[in-house]
Amino acid sequence: MKLLKFGGTSLANAEKFLCVANIIKQKKDVEQIAVVLSAPANVTNYLVTIIEKKIQNNKILETINLVENIFVELINNILKIQSDFNYQKIETIIKKEFDELKSIIHGVVLLKQCPDSIRAIIISRGEILSVFIMKSILECKNHSVTLIDPIENFLSIGNYLDSTVDIPESKKRINKIKIDKNDIILMPGFIAGNEEKELVVLGRNGSDYSAAVLASCLNAHSCEIWTDVDGVFTADPRIVSNARLLKSISYQEAMELSYFGAKVLHPRTIEPISQFKIPCFIKNTNNVESDGTLICEKNNSEKNFLKGVTHLDNIVMFNVSGTSIKYVGNIIPRIFTTLSRNNIKIILFTQSSSENKIIFCIMNNEMDKVLSSLNKEFQLELKDKLLNSFQITNNLSILSVIGSNIYQKHNVASKIFSSLGEGNINILAVAQGSSEHSISLVIEKKYILKAVQKVHDAFFYNKKIIYAFLIGIGGIGSELLAQILKQKQYLDEKNIIIKFLAIANSKKILILENTTKLCNWKNDFKQSNETFNLKFLNKFIKKNHFSNSVIIDCTSDQYLSEQYVNFLENNFHVVTSNKKANTSKFSYYKNIRHTAYKNNKKFLYETNVGAGLPVIETLQKLFQTGDNLIRFKGILSGSLSFIFGKLEEGVLLSQATREAKELGFTEPNPYDDLSGIDVARKLLILAREVGYEIELKDIKIEPILPIDFKKCNSVNEFFLQLKKLDTFFLNRINKAHNIGNVLRFVGTIENKGECYVKIEEININDPLYKVKNGENALAFYTNYYQPIPLVLRGYGAGNKVTASGVFSDLLRTLS
Ligand code: ADP
Ligand code: ASP
Ligand code: MG
């Protein structure tokens, strides 16, 4: 004998009812089958709202009619597919059920209260009707059916709404029923009967439990719970898209998962099936072929000791405290006794070691009952101020991580804390080993989905995701995208996903939906009509921050650089090739770092000096380990490196500058290179990096161009002016050359932080002597590196090397 249970999600419409009938038929061809059915999807929820609306009765009839229509529509549609379906008979049953329901509700409205016994009758109507409909479908497919009445046969203990079944007694009763071995056994789930043979229900989601009990009573060799997902996942697949299907779990693990919120299975289901060692499969009605999850005594196939991340919503936390709490005898047993007397389940309990503070969590709907019963129990202590009045916090959720002997494993708690910390999610309480197989934490409900995703990712998803927002798609930005696309295979191998949220320039933005392909970004960007401005940007970052979100600034925009603090405050890392922020006022420079630290975010700007050369990181590492800068000398401009190299070969200044421009080494107007300001900015960044609190104006620039040299808008005019300097420079070069020296445009930081930028004569022993052709070189004379300095040398400009530096910063956000 095999037991099959179909949940509401498997009975949501006519097609699904017929699909379930087919599954039953196929299984029945192999062996005898017993079937437990839930109400069609949402029906119980509607019935519950009818009772909850009982006092404001204006909407009640509307809701009853709505539920009645669900059934009428259901049988109409069944008839369309199954033409011999006994429509009239079922329609009469439905009408009778709803007439009765209306008169019961009428009584409830008059009484202005709904006793639990009546509540149980109302909310279980869906199951009763599901069974009548299925019986009729099976009969017109020529199957004979034996109905089991759970009110008569499932003896229940406990209250009307959350009863427990006495299995030995129920087994006796069921064994007395004469069942033909060819019959399909059919029973409504969720329902049982008490000693007085009154209808009771088994708690919300209780049909799973009915199935497990019936399987035990019938000595079934297995039990299949059919639902709308492939089995038990490492998290609710509706909220965590990368949740993983568990092939098999033990009874204990299934119990923990369901107890802490994995709705796929009612927690009580496990008691009977584990007691009678009945293997249980969770299967998907929408994907019949899938193997599902096997729940059995010992799980053999899952290597990972961790099984899942679950959550429970609608939690309320009670805080019991008081300076004299120690003198209140037996406080914990008294709390437990009071609550259990009132049938209240404590979901999580924790106490401080001194017993000064006790925290426990219950479900929201039990809050009033708990408060009044505790106030009564501790009335004297409250009056004498031995206890403070109970502090209640609402709108909470409990997140749990489930795994075998989780407390014996290292790192689990710290991993949970750090992943929640990363998401700026506060933990309000942690359960003190309430179970050996789970760790539970209380957090605010508004963060729960993000928290589940983050904790799940930390344990089960070994992919590292960067959510990137690129601003600036000129040379560097476009090259960055090209390099990321080119590296796809490498990134895949390393389990890194760079997911672009959006790409923008100063005018418009392309939002990348899940379906947009990055490789088509150029075309898609052209087609985008979305205007990009600060207002849009602010709205976007408030809505779109994920666990590892990064804003990449590949512009040279001042205004954008002034938003970095805002970005960091909104949980974005900032990666930038834009030098403006690091060269603005020192107070802002400090504020960015302070904000990044405070928000646990990264601010990375390796390409600000020397493009892709590892300058900043090297310096930081050096100074972290106690080194000090004695002196710095460097060629920090690719264009000036090229121009001075050419001068050395006898090329005139204007000609060398023209060549540099043609090769793309210079800014659009080469005046900006020759003015020395760009080198001064880089020097400022280096000086600040090694600890000097200076401003741009503190850097002395000895310009290449004389003071009367005008910045003209026309590049031609600039070259005409420049020509007039050719002879002067030729002479200067020759003079240096005659004594074996060359000229270089050098940035220097002296010991006390004095910084200057100027043309220097360099001799053959200097590391900067051979640096030309657009190369940069940076010589750091430090305590550790002297008399021979640490020299970094290589191309320090160009889209390729800069983009690769930005790319590498982007990857560093993961560390
Ligand atoms: P049924 O109507 O079949 O009883 P339920 O809605 O009660 O179905 O339970 C199935 C749902 O349980 C799934 O749709 C899924 O969203 C939810 N669920 C929550 N946690 C898990 C989990 N860990 N694994 C699988 N499903 C889960
Ligand atoms: N229909 C009931 C509920 O929704 C029982 C069940 O589906 O398991 O709670
Ligand atoms: Mg269910």
Image (tube, rainbow, N blue to C red):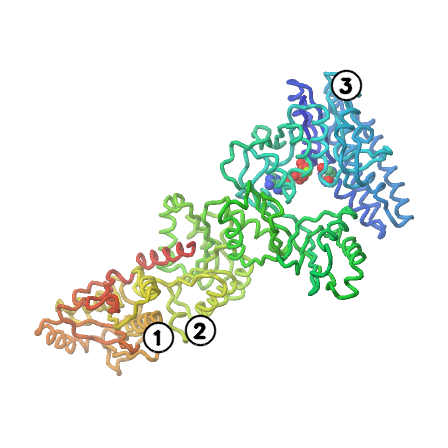
What residue do we see at 49% from left, 52% from top?
512
Q: Horizontal and vertical percent for residue 159?
A: 80, 41
Give the mark toward the camera: 1 or 2: 1
User: Does 96 sit left or right of 714 as displayed?
Assistant: right
Circle 1 residue: 692
Q: Does the image show residue 658?
A: no
| Label 2 Cα neighbours within 10 Å, binned few <14 / some 14-19 / many ≥20 | some
Quadrant of residue 691 within the rendered picture: bottom left
Q: Does the image show residue 541?
A: yes
Q: Which mark is residue 588?
A: 2
Q: Earlier in the sequence, mark 1 or mark 3?
A: 3
Q: Secondary structure at mark 2?
A: helix
Amino acid at dot 1:
Tyr
Q: Quadrant of the C terminus?
A: bottom left
Tally the marks: 3
Distance between mark 1 and mark 3 Cα atoms? 91 Å
Residue 812 or residue 475, whichever sits in front: 812
Q: Is mark 1 within 8 Å of ligand 1?
A: no
Circle 3 residue: 179
Q: Which mark is residue 775?
A: none
What residue do we see at 15% from left, 78% from top?
728
Quadrant of residue 40 within the rendered picture: top right
